[in-house]
């Protein structure tokens, strides 16, 4: 493992997520609100597990808000209400290509 690669989190599907080439990867936790709908997509997931942004549609990942026409980025990205994971849901179609 190269020293320049930094562990940034764990994803239930991808497992360890590393910060590669300064590429920001956000993870979103499972809570009681989204548990049921997420479980239908990702079997075995439970409260406290996390999924990275790659499993969500780009418009479901809220990176900031517009205030009087100015874009104010959030420090921590948020997930839209009712967002459900829909991409790369199989371990065999991993987020990373080897
Ligand atoms: Zn992932």
Image (cartoon, rainbow, N blue to C red):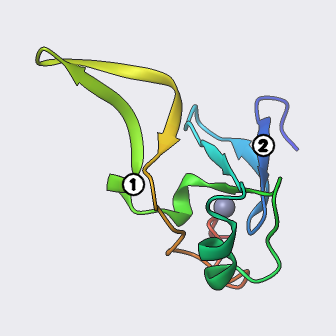
Instruction: Examine the rendered structure and indicate whether residue 66 appears above or below residue 68.
Output: below
SS under mark 2 = strand
Q: Earlier in the sequence, mark 2 or mark 1?
A: 2
Q: For marks 2 and 1, give the CA distance.
A: 20 Å
- The residue at which mark 2 appears reads as 9
Could you say where residue 53 lies in the image, as x and y percent from the top left? 55, 53
The one of 3 and 38 positioned closer to us in this rendering: 38
Q: Is residue 28 left or right of residue 48?
A: left
- Counting from the top left corner in percent of width and height, residue 79 is at 49, 47
Q: Residue at x 71, y 56 (%)?
A: 30
Tell me where residue 58 sits by quadrant.
bottom left
Residue named by callout 1: 60
Image quadrant where one finds the N terminus: top right
Q: Name the front one of labels 2 and 1.
A: 1
Mark drawn on residue 4: none
- Relative placement, left or right, of 78 versus 97 is left
Residue 5 lies in quadrant: top right
Q: Quadrant for ligand 1? A: bottom right
């Amino acid at each position: 493992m190269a020293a320049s690669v930094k562990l940034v989190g764990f994803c239930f599907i991808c497992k360890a997520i590393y910060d590669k080439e300064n590429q920001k990867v956000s993870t979103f936790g499972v809570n009681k609100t989204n548990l049921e709908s997420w479980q239908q997509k990702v079997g075995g997931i439970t409260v406290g597990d996390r999924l990275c942004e790659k499993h969500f549609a780009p418009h479901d990942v809220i990176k900031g808000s517009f205030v009087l026409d100015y874009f104010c980025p959030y420090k921590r990205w948020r997930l839209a209400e009712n967002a459900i994971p829909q991409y790369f849901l199989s371990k065999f179609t991993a987020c990373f290509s080897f």
